[in-house]
Every structure is written in C-alpha cells, then in structure tokens.
Image: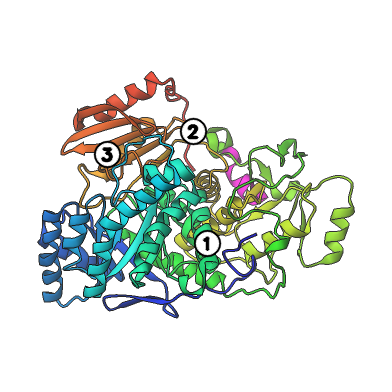
Amino acid sequence: MPTYSPSPFSPPRRQTREVTVGNVAIGGDNEVAVQSMLTSDTRDAEACVKEALGLTEAGCEIVRVTAQTKKIARNLEHILKGLRDAGSDVPIVADIHFKPDAAMEAAKWVEKVRVNPGNYADKKKFEILEYTDEQYAGELQRIEEKFGPLVDFCIEGGVAMRIGTNHGSLSDRIMNRYGDTPLGMVESALEFARIARDRNYHNFVFSMKASNPKVMIEAYRLLTARLAEEGDDWNYPIHLGVTEAGDGEDGRIKSAIGIGSLLHDGVGDTIRVSLTEDSIYEIPVAEALDKVVTEMRLTRSDLQIGWDAATWDPFSYERRKSAKIAVCGIPLGGDETVRVFTSRKKWDALAHKIDRLGDFKPEIVVEDSGVIAIDPRDEEAVIFLNEAETPSLVTVSDGIDLSVIDAYRLLAIKVDPKHPILLKDTLVPSENEFLPKLLTASVNLGSLICDGIGDAVLIQGEQAPGQSLRMAYNILQASGARIFKTDYVACPSCGRTLFNLQTTTQKIREATGHLKGVRIAVMGCIVNGPGEMADADFGYVGGAPNKINLYVGKEAVKFNIPEAEAVDRLIDLIKEHDRWIEASTEEVEVV
C-alpha cells in the first residue's frame, strides 16, 4: 500500500522544501502559516487595504485577493502600494480562475499567484469525450503553451505559486480519464507541476480542496503519497482547506475534520478556514485549530506498527465491518446508523424535554450500555475480547497516554472487527473553552469516522448536555456518517461575489432547514458555481449583479432570476423534483 505518512501512529511532520512568499517562509521547519481571503471588491483598493490590515492585525500571515480579469488585476498595484504605505509587508496572493492574462498581470505586483488547474486554460463544458493518448498529449501541449509563460514570469520576478485543485472544477480532460475523484484532483495538479519543474521552477505549493471532508482528506493523502513516489525532490509544501465549509458551528466542524485530520498526521504547512462570514472571523478559528492539533501531537506513542497492519484504506472510505448488536434495545453496528451516547448525568438533565428534541435526541446512556473499555496495548484484554464468541461494544479506557486517534486506530487493528466501537472525543477531562472543545471533538471523531472506524460516539469534553448532543450530531453530519438535517455548501465571500452571501445563506436556511438529507449549494459567482458545488442536489449561484441562476446538480435550469424572487424560485424547484416536505408544526427544541 502506498503511504502518505511513515506510520498510522504519531507520524512526524512531513518534511518539505521551503517556499518563500514575500517575507513568509512556508514548509521546512517553519510553523504552520494562517491565510485568509479578502471579501472586498478588488477594484476598491481602499476597502481592500483596510480589510487586509484588519486581517493581519488579527494574525493572518498571507492574504489572498481575487483577480477575475486583466483589468481588475491591474488594481493590485494600488492595493499593494496602499498596504506598503501603511507599513504592512503582508504577502498578497492573486486568485486566478480562467484568465491566463489576468495571472500575467497579477504576477507583476503580488508575491504569489494561485492557479486552478481545472480552469486555468480550460472552459468547463461537461463534455464526454474519449481521449486517445495522442489527443491527451496534445491537450497537455496546449496547457503548457498557456501555463508556461506564467511560470517563466514567476521565475524572473521571484513570485511563488499555488497549484490549487478543487474537487468540483476538474477539467473535462481529467474528468473523462480519471473521473470526479481524488485521483483526478491529484493528476490535475501534477500535470501543471511537471510543466513548472521542466522549467526548473520549484517555488510552489499544492492544495486539494473539496467541500466534502472525506473527499478532501483522501485527495490530500493521495497527493502526499504520490509526491513521495515521484521522488525526494517532490517535497513541496501543502496548503490545507475545506472549500465552501459554510458558516457557524457547521463550518468550523467541517474545517476541523478536514484540516485537523491531516495536520494530526503531519501533513500541511499552511491553512485557511473558509467560512461564510466576515473573513476576520476565520483567523481565530484557524489559530485555535492549529493549537489544538499541536497539543494533540504532543501525546506521542512509541507503537512500532506500520501501514501493513491497518484495517482501513486511507485512500478509499469503507466503514469497518462490525457485527450488529442490540444495546439498550437499540440496534448498533453493522450497517446501522452511528448512534449517539450520553452520560446518565446529561440524560437526567434533559429527561424533561427529550420528547421535544427531535433529531437531537440522546439514544443510549453509556453507564447502561455494558460497553467494555480497554487499553488497546493490553494484550490480555485484547485476547479475552477476541476469543469471545459473541460481539461486544468496546471502547478505549479514559486516561491512557495515547492520543484519541492513535488509541482508536490501534483498537481497530487489535480487536476483532465483529466488535462494534464506541468513539469518545477525549480521554482526558479538559477545562478548555467551547471552541477548543468543538475543534478537538471534530478532529478526533471526524478523522476516525472518515477512516471508517466507529459505530457510536460519546462527547465527554463538553459538559453542557444540550451543547454536547448538538456537537455529536453536527460532527456526524459533517463527516457524512449520519444525515439528519439539510446540508449546506456555502462558499466564503470574496471580491467575485455577486450578492450578500451571509444574509442570503441565512434566508435559505430559514426556508429549507427542515429538508432532511437535501444538499443545497450557495455560491457567490460562476467560479464557485456548477463545478465547485460538486455533489449538491440544488444550487443557488450568482450569475450577474442581482441576478441568480438555479441549478439541479451541475445543470443550470433557471437563469437571471431577480435576487428578490430567487429563494422562492429555489423552493419551487425543490418541489418540482419531489424533494420538498412541509415543515412540522410540532415544536422542536433545539439543544
């Protein structure tokens, strides 16, 4: 099996070459750098300078700005001048989609250019074509003719680059050969990287963003493994992010699952938490996430177990095949949904209103469950379990000196797969505030669930009964383990956005939040439109100022709808496709 890290247990941080972006060094022995992106219109230099200064004051180390066209890219000169006149040396990254001439203009002014291999030299038409090897080679030659001049210009100007693939915007060429897969994402980036390397250009980083944390994790793991296979000199730094994570608790959880899981395994040199909120709110979340994972990695194991022993495939999700058993009369394990446990104390605190909690109900009291807790390093306990004829619910003992992820990965290896596993968010009590608890739970539980490990979850770190239940269910939803509410894919606002994403997303939530299992994408522009929506059921996409296009999957079906009517028209579209149900009139108390 190819590997993305030396071991499943306490892997060291991936060693990379150092890439310089202005005055910031990425990779090597440098700490993880925090990035964000301006929401201001790039044509408004004053607003961009003000927002960028606010971000840097909050702790942002690299700022990205959209440059949709060559004309707009010219204004980067004034943004950079305004920042330098204000005494700021924060590096600026130009975000490029579709327009090579915009990239060439932007590279005159900024310290770094981000290109998306899926659309830099391609217009996505969703065409189904069969490429011969000769035709494919011809396509690569065409790409080199478009991309090569930018590489040469970056070499001359000392400009860095991010080769940033997005799951939903792969080119038709890649889609037809590799499909809409993590492998396609990796191959798309490697095509561009080879062109850069052929010109002896190495000052670049990679990214593999997706809105689905499972896809994102698999893509980055596959990228890291492929780079290792290519050779030691393919040790380029990696930027991590879950694109279109959304807002509020959901956005923080999705980001923590995707980014945190990889950081825990030693992968990642820069991060951006993409929230559908003012960009300044991304910075404390990113800093807290980096701190949480750094502290997790301090609990090192000396387990000498390699990937050959792993019972999960890190590059392809499959749920661990446990037996189905009944716990307190509730089916658990096998193909049953992942169950939510709580403590007796929390159950009693909620007992008076459990019938009003709707889909947030606690299901099983851990003290009544008969769960067997062991240290997975205890060979006698493991042998006892594995020799038992009947399956039992098992978990890891509290207080042991292993990280949560290491402990449960070891449990999954050691214990017969017939035994279902109860995951815990923490094994050691903590006095942290809510955000670190939320991020810790998301990283630990989300990482394991995305590995296919776990049949039930128990939140121990958060003591508030309602908050701990909400946390458990939201982590299950974000990791794709249990869909109990509408799922939203909402891009963070940027200078391309054609409507107010925050207020619009909230309106759509209010109108559709009861549609269990429906996935709705809210995208500010066509760049984050049909491609970036990936696997959404319905899409609400900015097509022009104050005009909205509506999508079913990746197909635009309604065009240029006045923004004032668009939410109602979205509801009509959902009804047309028999996905609409009326909201319940029964009162459901949100925990």
Asked if the stretch drawn in magenta spans residue 350, the answer is yes
Q: Badges 1 and 3: C-beta atoms under 8 Å apart?
A: no
Calculate the distance from the C-alpha at mark 1 to the C-alpha at mark 3.
40 Å
Residue located beneath label 2 in the image: 517
Looking at the rendered structure, the kind of residue marked 1 is Arg
Residue at x 44% of width, y 78% of height: 28
Of the residues under marks 2 and 3, which one precedes in the sequence?
A: 3
User: Where does the image place residue 76, in percent across and percent down from the top left?
Assistant: 14, 63
Which disc, if any, is residue 504?
3
Q: Is residue 211 visible?
A: no
Of the residues under marks 2 and 1, which one precedes in the sequence?
A: 1
Dominant secondary structure (helix, strand or loop) of the stretch shown in magenta: helix
User: Where does the image place residue 218, in percent across and percent down from the top left?
Assistant: 53, 54
Q: Left of 432 or right of it: where is 337?
A: right
Looking at the rendered structure, the kind of residue marked 3 is Thr
504 versus 433 height, above or below:
above
The region drawn magenta spans 341-352
Q: Tell me the element at label 3.
A: helix
Q: Within 10 angstroms of label 1, few (less than 14), some, or many (20 or more) residues?
A: some
Q: Left of 193 or right of it: where is 360?
A: right
Residue located beneath label 1 in the image: 226
Residue at x 38% of width, y 24% of height: 574
Calculate the distance from the C-alpha at mark 2 to the C-alpha at mark 1.
34 Å
**Which quadrant: the N terminus?**
bottom right
